[in-house]
Image (cartoon, coloured by chain):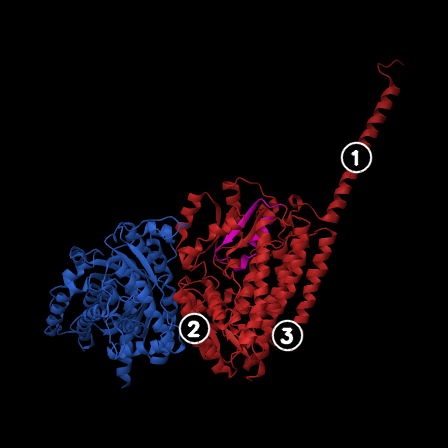
Chain colours: A red, B blue
């Protein structure tokens, strides 16, 4: 049979085609396998991670943790997850024992509701990080956890409510104070007394870990007639007293104006519930005036006299100097960190770890754990700088965060980096205590301590003179930032009072800036999803950019801790 | 009661910050010095050659531009002041003597500052080349070191700038003269106010509120003749035969320069017999005493700290003493109850109002009506209902007490 084509040739051609397809398929398969191996070993590259797919609906909990590559996943499991669970138990045993802790959990809702979610707090803050950034940021978290346990365990150890009304040795050797009284003013007694802030753990730390805990306290103070518009931080601080949820752990207290009108008023309200001797150590309002500093020095001296009278223990200058020198070491390392953050791409600490650790450390004062963690971070940072590691390789914008941050969503900057490549380099809270303290003689020491005290959280910039709020431009330049995340604490009268001027200046200076409205601890006023939506809108409509990880654009985490 | 001769004139003076007497004072060649808070001692701004004007923004109900600058979430009073300033209503001012005694008014006054920062634009709100703003720090306590500090602040941030900018005489003699003038105003206002202690007062709370306000916003030397005449007139004023009120109340709280608010309370059946609020007379119209060996400036500093029962003070004993002083005020003026009113977004008074509401009833047995209000009270219907209910409850208590006895 004569066919119009050569069958043998056709067969050969088909066979060749089949081979070619098989080869192509094999190559493709081979390539996919390599990719899988690569992703397994190193973790997926930034654009392919789809971190939003990991969340279980509404809860913000992970279906499973992110695979960060072998090395980083193992580091996360052993050096972060396991290490921190173990050290959290060891810390409890070291600082007061498991019995005191169990009693405290039973009595105070703020500790029970926040102890177990701690590792989820780590997860939220460290999401998507790799290498030095993961390690260094985690050490900052470790420092905060240790310090927190140390403080609440001291409260429980000394608490008369947990010991049948007995005022034990720990009670008589503990000084209570408002959370924005710098711990350093108690250094002269630090060899004999512990100082623990009244609200730092029950309110401030808890709402970072579990945003639902604090809502109860805000509602409590409003239930006795307080309107909803004063600063919600102050409301929460007053609410823990209304709910009688503050341990009775010290015979007297040092209070302050915590830098705003609502805080003064909160102290007044707390006094009616506290009913113990108190000394008011206000932060002067106009701290640039040398005369004001002179007055502040006299106030500090007068407070020391009050402590001497209350405790019967004299002021110890040697102890003060010893502790201040240690604190100065912490500050000097902080400056090194800022230098790396400002001038390199190898700064290994993400926005949330930088902000929280710094404010916690600088407010609390010297503590062994800060030195321990700083040593670890120094090693990581020096190595990253030496190797010129790009610790946040997908940075599109270097962001400075200004004004007071949302406590219930302090990890927004972790999300912003993963979703949009917005890398928060530095924030206002970190920059407040920008000084070391002279220890050459008492006069100089007190003068510097007064300065430090006056630069209190929120006072220095947010409600200090207008001039200090507009230091933003200077720091923006210093840290080489090209964008501003402007926190808009809806109930902070000091910042709200300058809202329009900031709008004008952003326009006149052609500065890229987005606002983050929030109500400090109260996640009901502006939800986390709303904050994300506003940033998404800005990045798409103003910046015309595409997200790095579209799965993070919208998700419901309303029920998450 | 027969109308007071100067009441309509006084009411007219309250319609504008730059009123007829202020204009006359300026025409006399004196400098107009603005301030907002009790803690800026008006007596220092009334030195020979200048006069004090406590800032108000009458009839400002919609501070739109100020809301852009200070947001809708700050005190309406502070925003109204900024709005009035932006409208040009304070261009007559030669200086603003500022305090950071509450955050919102501080921010308002910072907006007025000109050419003081490179980092933010100069808004040049006050159209007056001589105009300047100077801030003083006010302590939170009343102890000796706080008084010394306050006196020093007043010397460096009030007296010296007035002297340097306008050549004002700030000698001790000049200070004594200003104190004497203020004491005369205070004596007259107290004399007028004391008629509220009568069983059937011969002055209403509204009338007194108006008189007190004009003494704060007009040059002292120009308002004094009218005050003297009014005090004289009241000596013979006959009360109405039938009481026009059903109970007497003390009005306490935050900033209040709106006499219509007092009128509203009185229209519901109460008589406001004492005024303990910012702009009220209880603190501003006490006699300044210069003690033996004390220099006049320190006497002023001591006076202003000691007389104040502002919720700003943080000393433990002060927090409690001001409740006692409020209770004493109710007793002294034979009040049946207490109305505590705080301006919305005023953080000091939001808390103080809560504490007063609990403590005054619990520890002193004084009925309390707790109100949150705006600077200018548009919601008068709701407030009227609240006041009427409170007055009825006080009446019922009286009836029950009568039945028991």
Extreme residue in the bottom direction: B405
Disc 2, disc 1: CB below 8 Å? Answer: no
Say which quadrant the C terminus of chain B sits in.
Answer: bottom left
Task: Check disc 1 and report the residue beneath it.
Answer: A25
Circle 2 crowding by C-alpha within 10 Å: few under 14, some 14–19, many from 20: many
A497 and B45: which is toward the camera: B45
Say which quadrant the N terminus of chain B sits in.
Answer: bottom left
Q: Is residue A377 magenta?
A: no
Q: Is residue A105 visible?
A: yes
Estimate the spatial distance between the alpha carbons at disc 3 and disc 1, rounded to whole Å: 62 Å
Vertical comparison of B8 with A36: above or below: below
Of callouts 2 and 3, the N-terminal one:
3
Location of residue A356 (image quadrant)? bottom right
Residue A485 locus on image (x, y percent): 50, 50
* Chain identifier of the residue bearing label 2 in the image: A
Of callouts 3 and 1, the N-terminal one:
1
Q: Which mark is residue B262?
A: none
Task: Check disc 2 and report the residue beneath it.
Answer: A299
For mark 1, give the secondary structure: helix
State which region is magenta.
A394-417
For discs 2 and 1, the disc positioned in front in the rendered view? 2
Task: Check disc 3 and report the residue beneath it.
Answer: A95
Residue B155 locus on image (x, y percent): 31, 66
* Chain identifier of the residue bearing label 3 in the image: A
For discs 2 and 3, the disc positioned in front in the rendered view? 2
């Amino acid at each position: 049979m004569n066919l119009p084509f050569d069958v043998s040739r056709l067969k050969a051609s088909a066979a060749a085609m089949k081979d070619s397809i098989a080869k192509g398929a094999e190559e493709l398969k081979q390539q996919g396998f390599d990719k899988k191996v690569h992703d397994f070993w190193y973790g997926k590259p930034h654009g392919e991670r789809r971190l939003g797919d990991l969340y279980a609906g509404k809860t913000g909990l992970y279906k499973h943790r992110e695979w960060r590559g072998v090395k980083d996943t193992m580091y996360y499991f052993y050096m972060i997850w396991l290490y921190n669970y173990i050290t959290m138990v060891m810390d409890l045993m070291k600082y007061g024992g498991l019995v005191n802790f169990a009693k405290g959990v039973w009595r105070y809702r703020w500790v029970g509701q926040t102890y177990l979610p701690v590792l989820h707090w780590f997860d939220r803050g460290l999401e998507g990080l790799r290498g030095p950034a993961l390690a260094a940021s985690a050490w900052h978290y470790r420092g905060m956890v240790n310090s927190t346990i140390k403080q609440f365990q001291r409260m429980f150890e000394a608490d008369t409510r947990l010991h049948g009304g007995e005022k034990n040795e720990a009670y008589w050797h503990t000084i209570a104070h408002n959370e924005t009284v710098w711990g350093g003013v108690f250094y002269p007694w630090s060899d004999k007394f512990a100082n623990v802030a009244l609200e730092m753990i029950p309110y401030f730390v808890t709402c970072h870990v579990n945003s639902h805990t604090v809502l109860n306290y805000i509602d409590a103070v409003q239930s006795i007639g307080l309107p909803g518009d004063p600063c919600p931080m102050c409301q929460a601080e007053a609410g823990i007293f209304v709910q009688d949820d503050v341990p009775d752990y010290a015979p007297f207290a040092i209070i302050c104006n915590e830098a705003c009108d609502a805080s003064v008023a909160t102290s007044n309200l707390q006094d009616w519930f506290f009913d113990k001797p108190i000394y008011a150590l206000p932060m002067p309002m106009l701290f640039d005036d040398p005369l004001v500093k002179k007055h502040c020095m006299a106030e500090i001296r007068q407070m020391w006299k009050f402590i001497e009278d209350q405790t019967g223990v004299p002021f110890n200058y040697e102890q003060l100097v010893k502790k201040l020198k240690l604190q100065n070491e912490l500050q000097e390392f902080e400056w090194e960190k800022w230098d790396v953050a400002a001038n390199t791409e190898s700064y290994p600490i993400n926005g949330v770890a930088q902000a929280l650790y710094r404010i916690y450390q600088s407010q609390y004062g010297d503590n062994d754990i800060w030195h321990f963690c700083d040593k670890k971070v120094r090693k990581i940072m020096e190595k990253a700088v030496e190797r010129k590691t790009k610790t946040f390789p997908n940075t599109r914008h270097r962001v400075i965060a200004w004004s007071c941050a949302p406590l219930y969503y302090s990890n927004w900057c972790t999300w912003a980096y993963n979703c949009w490549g917005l890398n928060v380099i530095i924030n206002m809270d970190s920059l407040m205590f920008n000084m070391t303290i002279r220890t050459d003689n008492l006069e100089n020491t007190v003068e510097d301590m007064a300065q430090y005290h006056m630069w209190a959280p929120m006072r220095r910039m947010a409600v200090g003179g207008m001039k200090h709020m507009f230091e933003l431009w200077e720091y923006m330049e210093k840290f080489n930032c090209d964008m501003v995340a402007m926190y808009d604490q809806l109930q902070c009268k000091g910042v709200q009072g300058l809202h329009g001027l900031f709008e004008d200046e952003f326009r006149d200076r052609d500065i890229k800036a987005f606002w983050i409205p929030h109500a400090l601890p109260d996640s009901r006023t502006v939800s986390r999803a709303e904050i994300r939506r506003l940033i998404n809108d800005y990045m798409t409509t103003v910046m015309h950019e595409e997200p790095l990880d579209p799965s993070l654009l919208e998700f419901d985490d309303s029920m998450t801790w | 009661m027969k109308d007071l001769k100067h009441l309509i004139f006084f009411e007219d003076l309250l319609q504008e910050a730059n009123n007829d007497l202020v204009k006359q004072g300026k025409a006399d060649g004196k400098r107009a010095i603005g301030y907002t808070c009790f803690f800026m001692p008006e007596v220092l701004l009334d030195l020979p050659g200048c006069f004090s004007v406590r800032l108000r923004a009458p009839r400002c109900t919609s501070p739109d531009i100020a809301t852009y600058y200070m947001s809708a979430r700050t005190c309406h009073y502070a925003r109204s002041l900024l709005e009035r300033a932006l409208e040009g209503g304070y261009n007559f001012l030669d200086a603003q003597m500022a305090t950071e005694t509450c955050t919102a008014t501080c921010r308002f006054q910072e907006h007025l500052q000109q050419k003081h920062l490179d980092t933010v634009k100069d808004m040049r709100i006050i159209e007056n080349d001589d105009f300047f703003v100077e801030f003083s720090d006010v302590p939170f306590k009343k102890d000796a070191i706080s008084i010394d500090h306050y006196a020093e602040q007043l010397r460096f941030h009030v007296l010296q700038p007035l002297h340097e900018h306008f050549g004002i005489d700030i000698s001790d003699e000049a200070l004594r003269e200003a104190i004497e003038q203020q004491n005369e105003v205070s004596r007259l206002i107290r004399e007028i106010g004391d008629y509220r202690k009568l069983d059937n007062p011969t002055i209403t709370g509204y009338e007194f509120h108006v008189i007190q306000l004009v003494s704060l916003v007009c040059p002292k030397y120009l308002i004094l003749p009218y005050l003297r005449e009014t005090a004289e007139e009241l000596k013979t004023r006959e009360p109405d035969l039938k009481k026009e009120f059903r109970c007497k109340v003390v009005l306490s709280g935050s900033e209040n320069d709106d006499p219509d608010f007092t009128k509203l309370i009185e229209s519901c059946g109460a008589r406001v017999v004492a005024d303990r609020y910012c702009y009220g007379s209880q603190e501003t119209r006490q006699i300044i005493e210069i003690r033996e060996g004390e220099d006049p400036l320190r006497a002023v500093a001591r006076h202003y700290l000691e007389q104040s029962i502002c919720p700003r003070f943080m000393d433990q004993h002060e927090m409690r003493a001001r409740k006692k002083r409020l209770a004493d005020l109710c007793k002294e003026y034979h009040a049946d109850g207490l109305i505590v009113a705080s301006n919305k977004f005023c953080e000091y008074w939001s808390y103080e109002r809560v504490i007063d509401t609990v403590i005054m009833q619990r520890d002193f047995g004084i009925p309390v009506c707790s109100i949150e209000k705006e600077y200018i009270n548009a919601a008068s219907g709701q407030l009227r209902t609240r006041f009427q209910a409170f007055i009825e409850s006080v009446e019922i208590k009286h009836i029950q007490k009568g039945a028991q006895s």
